[in-house]
Amino acid sequence: MSLLNSINIITVIIIFIFLMPVTAGILNPVSKERLRHSLLSIINGLNFILSFILSVYLTRVVVSASELHHDIVAYLIAMFVFMSVSFFVLELLMIPVCRHLIIPLADKLSSALDGRNSGAKRFLSGLWQLPKSVCMVLVLSLLLNFYANFINNPSAGDYINASKPYQAIHKMVLQPVLTADLVKKAPVLVGDAFRKAAEDYTPANSDSSGEPNYWKLPAIKYFNGMTIDEAVKSNSEIKDTAKQIVGKEKDAREKAYLLYKWVSKNIRYDYAKAEIVLENPSRVNSGSIITFEERTGVCFDYSCLYVTMCREVGIKVRLVSGLGYNGSEWGEHVWNQIYDPAKESWVNVDPTFANSGYDYFDNADFSSNHKYDVVQAEW
């Protein structure tokens, strides 16, 4: 049972999908007709990948500009339509390519293989299927990436991201191609709630090396009419929950990670509240207690609750404001830092962005979608 628990099913599926075409090629050496079919399959796979990528970007543009930009069903429908149309157009464009290039190429390759012995022919047939294997794995990885980042299921997202083959594909292929969409669902407040922090990033706030002097930037004194100290107040329920989450764990970093996972999984981002905040922050309640009770909030609420829980179990923690990238634009955002005694340094933690299914606990790529950080308070 322990062996089964140590095996990541996503890894098994990726390996199985990759080996299927290669194994089929070895067991059944290619003929002229199969060469044609293989080449056409590769073209169809590439068309699928291109149409998928096009549909993601087209859907983002169209749906985000409408009143349905928080409706996942509307997003899926629009994406299906754009993907179908994109695939159809690409198929039409590939007709002359297949007729004048793919089919003649298949005939020449078939003639070259006819003179080989059986073992060599099987080996070359297996190699011939490698592009198809790669295409199938990329298609699967794109679908897994879509699920991990657009469906609100953090546990499934964590499991997908735990697969080492998926991580490698994500780092080498998906992230460069779909960087703008990895955090598309990770929301930021694009408005005036923390506008001062961004506006005061000026040359006057840089030292002689040209680097920003964050400590000279103004602090957020109020949010929704309350001070930060008021926003991070605790109660007995939060205290008991925080202690229950960390249990007997003694390591500060591990305790901080357990709390980060709990907040990201149990607090739902409140899009309606975010829109209200942009118009008039005084119309909503904010802070740790209301967030814990209602299990919803915006980035400020996530970060305040995380601060409160960390304080209850003796973790040194900061509340940080700055700019976050939501996939299409930079906007005001709030996150945290915790002190890691082992590293003897502060590390970045974003429980709000973690709601997207991607790990934002001391992430090496943290600065790619977070900048101009201002430490507002430290405990």
Image (spheres, rainbow, N blue to C red):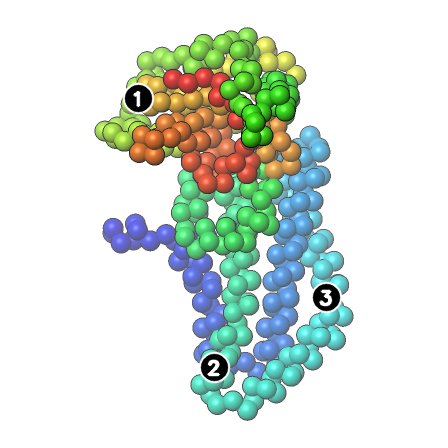
Residue shown at 49% from the left, 75% from the top: 126
Q: How far, Cα to Cα, is label 1 from label 3?
A: 61 Å
Disc 1 or 3, which lies upstream in sequence?
3
The answer, for residue 288, to whether it is visible in the render is no
Q: Give the secondary structure at mark 2.
A: helix
The answer, for residue 164, to whether it is visible in the render is yes
Q: How far, Cα to Cα, is label 2 from label 3?
A: 29 Å
Disc 2 or 3, which lies upstream in sequence?
3
Q: Position of residue 176 (x, y in %)?
A: 57, 49
Q: Which class describes the residues within 10 Å of circle 1: few (<14), some (14-19), or many (20+)?
A: many
Q: Which class describes the residues within 10 Å of circle 3: few (<14), some (14-19), or many (20+)?
A: some
The amino acid type of the residue labelled 1 equals Val
The amino acid type of the residue labelled 2 equals Arg
Q: How far, Cα to Cα, is label 1 from label 2?
A: 62 Å
Say whether residue 365 is left or right of residue 92.
left
Q: Where does label 1 land, which residue?
A: 313
Which of the labelled discs sits on residue 220, or is there none? Answer: none
Q: Report which quarter residue 131 is drawn in.
A: bottom right
Q: Where does label 2 land, which residue?
A: 122
Q: Where does label 3 land, which residue?
A: 94
